[in-house]
């Protein structure tokens, strides 16, 4: 065997950038799997790398857009606008087609979600602010990319009409600036293997697939569609209508695809796409000053329009409808398409909640989409990179008159896509049906939550007698509590998430956790005794309980008829209704105007307050939310149209009963939650008031709110699984 010469050996050993990026990614993933959370620290390196990538992009966009458009003459600019517009609309139609194919991979299931403060925030769409640069320099400083693009395009258009002699100097300067910034970006991209190693190690070491739960259905179908579009459909279309071959398109875009996928950031690969596009035309002997100008203009401009990656996220609305049993009807698809494209100009975070509302799907489903952000963000960016590159190649060829349609390639591409989808979608549907379980992650979390406490506590489960002799009024409660070493806490067993029993029969909830904290700090134990709305006052007055918990809302009537602690939480009034009826309760005026409305409500005193707002509604006081969610089998009993309760408590119940949703009528009505106390015991009341202030100041109540209301960190998990700890035993 002949020996290789040294230059030949170096050539074989030396890897190109794409290969080194793949090696860096693979090494990062292996490092994360090996050491788990111990390699979370490279996340800082990854953020630094992304920051370096971003630093030259915005000035590059300004220079390339102004220079690229300004170098065109009026006729070329018009031709480019027409051809690019047609290609853009065609790509949107293609993406929507794949969105509507995605539900073919969904099996059937139901689920709910925890409350989120964003559900009570009014977020009007602002189609003006992000796109109209009132102060361009402020837009640049705040990285308002669409507004910067509008400013740059407008300036470039204004430059078109300036005579070539007068604008030549400015164009030369902009060209030099673009070239310099491109070199900066290329230098940073050379660090990609190291930066992406850090990003991959951090992600693989800290992420866990358990948190995704049933979202694997959406994640899997989304990934499937992005891969088909990225590696089959888009490069196939380019090969059909342009002189470029399928393999040429993939080879030219691979570095940008890998970088975009790993960083989840389309912005950072714009200079790389521009350079690769120019090189592709050069390799074909088609590169001219016009092709360079078109590429430099098309890529920055199209970046600001909804790309295929964003459009494919509309499939989540269809997923949410399937998830909750409120499938979007085929007749609604045209309206859904138009609203989807337009709303995406405002961003995914605004578009999805808006579309969920319009399609009569619980908007709390959006919180589940947030969970998928990391994984789907990678694949959405992957598709966006290929979309941007393919769009630019096709539009540039169209503008320069070099489009060539191949019927043979078109037929081959169509057959491959149809066969691929016909095989993969049913297979995915069958696979997802086998993978998903009976309960979603939120329901499992809520029913398995526990109160971490070493306080000795006993729980009485028998309800109090309807009639009982009232003993003499007890002495000072605080004195008795400290002497006996126990706080008698009245609880309601069905007031999720304030006080309820988990799947192991343990009494848990936000209020229960607060009582454990109080007892621990006083050095006493706990005895939990159930109360009802009819007996709570008597139980407090005769000393059977020292305090009553259960998410009790304050109002004037309650304050006049009993004693309460300092409020410890603010809640929002809502009406829990069947999913499809949520639109009927968008405002209190709508509710008040509804005829023959029958509503359930917790607590007689609260009902008296609501009755003034809804004089014509039939309000029925119920002892427990279960009387609404699980009505009796009595055939003569009329079903309730809704249950008035706090949104915080309502969302917790929709986790257990996912066929229901929470409507928060406008204008929003807020209330405060407190504990019920015995009257005439100032020492006990003052202690609790001071203690609640302390717990608000040290963030104890905020942490419990995050856990029991928002569901953050509610799942008690151990260290992330990793090879070094769980297989090799290198770590404890």
Image (cartoon, rainbow, N blue to C red):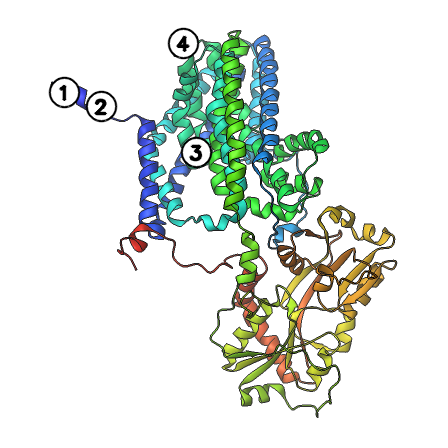
Q: Earlier in the sequence, mark 4 or mark 1?
A: 1
Q: Nearer the viewer, mark 1 or mark 3?
A: 1
Quarter location, residue 257 = top left
Given contact means CB atoms under 8 Å apart, are the residues at marks 1 and 2 in contact?
yes
User: Is 6 placed above or below 478 here?
Assistant: above
Question: Element type at marker 1?
Answer: loop
Residue under pointer 4 = 284
Please identify the quadrant where the C terminus is shown: bottom left
**Cα distance between the residues tagged 2 and 3:** 27 Å
The answer to whether residue 108 shows anywhere in this view is yes
Residue under pointer 1 = 4
Q: What label sits on residue 644 in the rendered view?
A: none
Q: Nearer the viewer, mark 4 or mark 1?
A: 1
- Position in image of residue 693 (x %, y %): 58, 71
Decide if residue 677 is on the left or right side of residue 639: left
Please tell me which residue lies in front, 288 or 238: 238
**Cα distance between the residues tagged 3 and 4:** 28 Å
**Cα distance between the residues tagged 1 and 2:** 10 Å
Question: Element type at marker 3?
Answer: helix
Label 1 neighbour load within 10 Å: few <14, some 14-19, many 20+? few
Residue under pointer 3 = 261
**Cα distance between the residues tagged 1 and 3:** 37 Å
User: Is 360 placed above or below 13 here?
Assistant: below
Residue under pointer 2 = 12
User: Is 703 placed above or below 155 here?
Assistant: below
Question: Element type at marker 2?
Answer: helix
Q: Nearer the viewer, mark 2 or mark 4?
A: 2
């Amino acid at each position: 065997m002949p020996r290789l010469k040294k230059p030949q050996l170096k050539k074989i050993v030396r890897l190109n950038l794409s290969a080194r990026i793949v090696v860096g990614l693979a090494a990062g993933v292996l490092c994360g799997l090996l050491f788990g959370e111990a390699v979370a620290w490279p996340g800082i390196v990854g953020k630094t790398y992304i920051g370096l990538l971003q630093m030259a992009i915005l000035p590059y966009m300004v220079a390339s857009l102004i220079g690229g458009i300004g170098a065109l003459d009026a006729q070329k600019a018009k031709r480019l606008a027409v051809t690019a517009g047609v290609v853009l609309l065609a790509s949107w139609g293609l993406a929507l087609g794949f969105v509507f194919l995605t539900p073919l991979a969904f099996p059937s299931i139901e689920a709910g979600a925890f409350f989120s403060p964003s559900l009570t925030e009014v977020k009007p769409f602002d189609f003006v602010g992000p796109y109209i640069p009132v102060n361009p320099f402020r837009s640049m400083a705040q990285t308002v990319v669409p507004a910067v693009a509008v400013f740059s395009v407008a300036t470039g258009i204004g430059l078109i009409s300036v005579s070539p002699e007068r604008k030549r100097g400015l164009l030369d300067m902009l060209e030099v600036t673009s070239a310099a910034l491109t070199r900066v970006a290329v230098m940073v991209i050379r660090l990609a293997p190291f930066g992406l190693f850090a990003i991959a190690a951090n992600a693989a070491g800290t992420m866990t697939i358990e948190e995704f739960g049933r979202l694997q259905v959406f994640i899997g179908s989304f990934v499937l569609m992005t891969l088909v579009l990225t590696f089959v459909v888009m490069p196939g279309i380019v090969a059909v209508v342009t002189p470029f071959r399928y393999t040429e398109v993939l080879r030219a875009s691979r570095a940008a695809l890998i970088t975009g996928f790993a960083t989840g950031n389309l912005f950072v690969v714009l200079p790389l796409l521009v350079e690769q596009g120019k090189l592709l035309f050069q390799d074909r002997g088609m590169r001219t000053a016009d092709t360079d100008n078109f590429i430099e203009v098309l890529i920055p401009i199209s970046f600001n329009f909804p790309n295929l990656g964003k459009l494919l996220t509309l499939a989540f609305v269809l997923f949410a409808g399937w998830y909750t049993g409120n499938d979007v009807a085929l007749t609604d698809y045209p309206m859904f398409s138009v609203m989807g494209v337009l709303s995406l100009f405002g961003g995914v975070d605004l578009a999805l909640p808006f579309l969920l509302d319009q399609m009569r799907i619980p908007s709390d489903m959006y919180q589940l989409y947030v969970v998928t952000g990391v994984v789907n963000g990678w694949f959405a960016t992957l598709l966006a990179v290929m979309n941007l590159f393919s769009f630019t190649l096709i539009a540039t060829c169209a503008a320069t008159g070099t489009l060539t349609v191949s019927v043979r390639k078109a037929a081959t591409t169509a057959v491959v896509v149809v066969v691929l989808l016909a095989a993969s979608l049913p297979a995915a549907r069958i696979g997802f049906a086998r993978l998903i379980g009976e309960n979603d992650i939120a329901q499992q979390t809520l029913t398995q939550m526990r109160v971490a406490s070493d306080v000795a506590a006993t729980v009485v489960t028998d309800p109090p007698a309807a009639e009982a002799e009232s003993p003499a009024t007890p002495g000072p409660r605080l004195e008795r509590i400290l002497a006996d070493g126990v706080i008698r806490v009245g609880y309601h067993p069905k007031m999720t998430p304030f006080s309820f029993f988990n799947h192991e029969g343990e009494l848990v909830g936000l209020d229960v956790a607060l009582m454990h904290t109080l007892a621990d700090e006083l050095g006493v134990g706990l005895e939990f005794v159930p109360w009802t709305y009819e007996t709570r006052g008597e139980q407090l007055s005769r000393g059977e309980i020292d305090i009553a918990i259960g998410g009790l809302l304050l109002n004037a009537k309650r304050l006049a008829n009993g004693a309460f602690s300092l409020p410890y939480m603010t809640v929002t009034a809502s009406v829990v209704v069947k999913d499809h009826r949520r639109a009927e309760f968008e405002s209190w005026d709508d509710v008040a105007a509804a005829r023959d409305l029958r509503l359930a409500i917790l607590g007689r005193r609260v009902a008296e307050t609501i009755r003034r707002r809804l004089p014509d509604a039939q309000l029925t006081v119920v002892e427990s939310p279960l009387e609404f969610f699980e009505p009796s089998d009595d055939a003569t009993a009329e079903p309730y149209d809704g249950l008035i309760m706090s949104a915080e408590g309502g969302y917790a119940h929709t986790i257990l009963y996912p066929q229901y949703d929470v409507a928060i009528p406008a204008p929003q009505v807020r209330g405060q939650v407190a504990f019920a106390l015995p009257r005439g015991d100032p020492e006990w009341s003052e202690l609790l008031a001071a203690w609640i202030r302390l717990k608000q100041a040290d963030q104890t109540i905020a942490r419990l709110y995050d856990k029991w209301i928002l569901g953050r960190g509610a799942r008690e998990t151990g260290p992330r699984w990793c090879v070094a700890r769980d297989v090799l035993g290198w770590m404890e």
